[in-house]
Structures are given as structure tokens and as C-alpha cells.
Amino acid sequence: MTASAPGFEQLVLEAGAERLPCVRRGPDGGARLLIIQPLLEEMNRTRRLLAQTGAALATLGVVSWLPDWPGTGDHAEPDFSVTRARAAAADAARAIGADGVLAVRGGALFVPEGVPALLFAPAEGAAILRDLLRARVAADAASGAGSTMAQLEARLTAGEALDLAGYPMTAALADALRAATVLRSGARVVALNADDGDVRLDGPPVWRQSEPEAAGALAAALACEVAAWLGR
Amino acid sequence: MASKAAEAGVSADGMVRAVLRDVLALPPARAAALKPESPLFGALPELDSMAVAGVLTELEDRLGIIIDDDEVTAGLFETFGALTRFVAEKRGA
């Protein structure tokens, strides 16, 4: 166990065929929570918010596991796959005996069946893909390359792998994202700055910010929601 | 952030200013200082390409509109005035 905070541990989570770099926070004997991170670049931008949320949860009697998904984060080769992430999430939930999962943004696409889920600001796969393509159009405009959404879609279809915010996007991954939908039925939905959930929280959309602002109040509020939902 | 209904009476100028402030985490004084001729993309370090996508999506969510793929062009984020005009036209449409 490292010394940075009580109940903080970096480990490798054995989840089926995957070995996932993982941060575990919280007291032994607490309610067991798997945190399913957002996808691709949104994951990096949300890292601090989720670290703060995990720390706040630890004080509320919840032990949380925050793994990086295969092909993202600390994994050497960026090679993200919807199928692999979904299987890894299910295996991870089984491996830790999760009482519930907290899925954030695109993480809501990978909620395992049979595990109670709280979705925070869930995002559909098609919306995430559209954001990434729009970001590429903006980047191309800045570099003078010039592209349109239609041209990018055509290049994907033609078999080219496009760099989208630092991750290789293939036609197969794009199709998988378009087909991936959030299952809201049975889940508790916490919305951010919107009224389309069971609960509304207000705060900065850190996953959209190039320099995510400190969002300690949002992390604390989210932790309270999760802990209450887990009966803590 | 206010709800959609509460923002119905807000001007396009105020709407765009609020979205830029919230998505980019701009200090209120900098958001307030934006003028129609103020350059955006390439001039605001906070406005990287991911943030451009974020601003568009936030505008869609708050206005209840869909911005078509062929409307996403380089010129849209050239100046504060260009983005404001676009939003005003979308709301009028």
C-alpha cells in the first residue's frame, strides 16, 4: 500500500483475460463500488474529478475500484475496443464482488448486467463519436488541413484510421460506438446541469475542459449521491 | 447554470458568453470582455479542438437545437460575433 492517503492502493486488477491498472480507495469492509470511467480523451479530463470522488466516498464508508480500460490510460498501445471494455467491466465487477457501479459519461455504455448502476451524466456512443469528429474538424481547420464531417466519415469508411483526440478511430470502432446505447431502465441517473435524470447536480463539465477546473464541490456532491444510493 | 426554460429569454450574446465561460472555465471578467470582433479559436488557449466540440454540444443541449454536420466550419469559431450570429440565426429558425 502506498502512503499518499489512508486506504489508497495502486494495483493490477485481474479481470477475466485483462490485467487492468487500478486505483483502490476506501476502508476494508465498506460497500464495494466499481467506477466505470469515461472513454478515450474524456477519461483523462475526468481523472481528477473521479480521484476526488473516490476520496470523498472513502470517508463515507465506500471502497471503490477505478480501473483503466484496455487500450486506454496507462496501457502502452492505444487500442480501444467497445467489446473488450464491456467484457472487462463485467469481469471487473465480478472480480471485486461489486455492490454497485458508478458509470460516468461514456462509461454508461459498459454497465454490466445484473449489477445495480448509478449513471453520472451518461453519454450515448453516437454523441461521443460526433464530439470527436467535430474536434477533428476544428483541429484540421486550425492546421489549415481543412476537413468536413462528411469527408472524415468517408475516410473512415474507406478503411483509414483517423487520429481523433489522440486515439486511433477505425470504421469498426466508429460503428461499435454508434451501436452502443445507454440502458437507463433500472439505473439511477444523476444529471449534470440538466433535468433529464433522477437527480440534478450543477458544476463544471470537466470532460470538456482542456484544463479541467477544480471541482471539489461537484465531487463531494456526487460522492454523497453514490453513498446514499448504496445505503451508506 | 440555468435550465432551458429560464434561458429562453437570454440573448444569443448572453447564451454564447455563458457557454464559453462554463465549458472553458473562463474567469467571469474575461468572458465579459469578449467583443464581437474578439478572435476565439487560436486566440483563447482554453479553446482547443475538444473544447470546440464541447461548446457546440452545450449550445445544442441548452437551446434544444441540432447543429448539422455541414454547419460545423472553420469560420464558426473565428470571432465571438460569428458564433453569436450563428446562434441567433439557429434560434430564429
Image (tube, coloured by chain):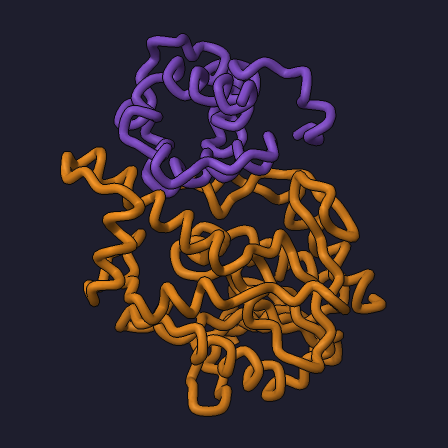
In terms of image quadrants, where is residue B91?
top right
Residue B66 place in picture, x, y as percent: 51, 37
Chain B drawn in what color? purple
Say left or right for A117 vs B72: right
Quadrant position of the N terminus of chain B in the picture: top right
Query: Looking at the image, which is closer to me, A74 or A71?
Result: A71
The image quarter containing residue A66 is: bottom right
> Which residue does the image show at 60% across and 64% down from the upper left?
A182
Q: Position of residue B80 (x, y in %)?
A: 39, 17
Q: What is the x, y in percent for residue B60?
A: 54, 35
Label count reads: 0
Q: Which residue is more in the foreground, A147 or B41?
A: A147
Relative horizontal placement of residue A232, taking residue A91 as reference (left or right):
right
- The reply, left or right, for residue A2 in relation to residue B71 is right
The residue depicted at 45 percent of the width and 70 percent of the height is A68
Q: Is residue A7 among what the camera can see?
A: no
Which is more toward the observer, A37 or A32? A37
**Residue A208 visible, this angle:** yes
In screen coordinates, is A110 left or right of A186? left
Which residue is painted at 70% across and 69% down in the image? A117
User: The chain shown in orange is which?
Assistant: A
Q: Is residue A37 above or below residue A1?
A: above
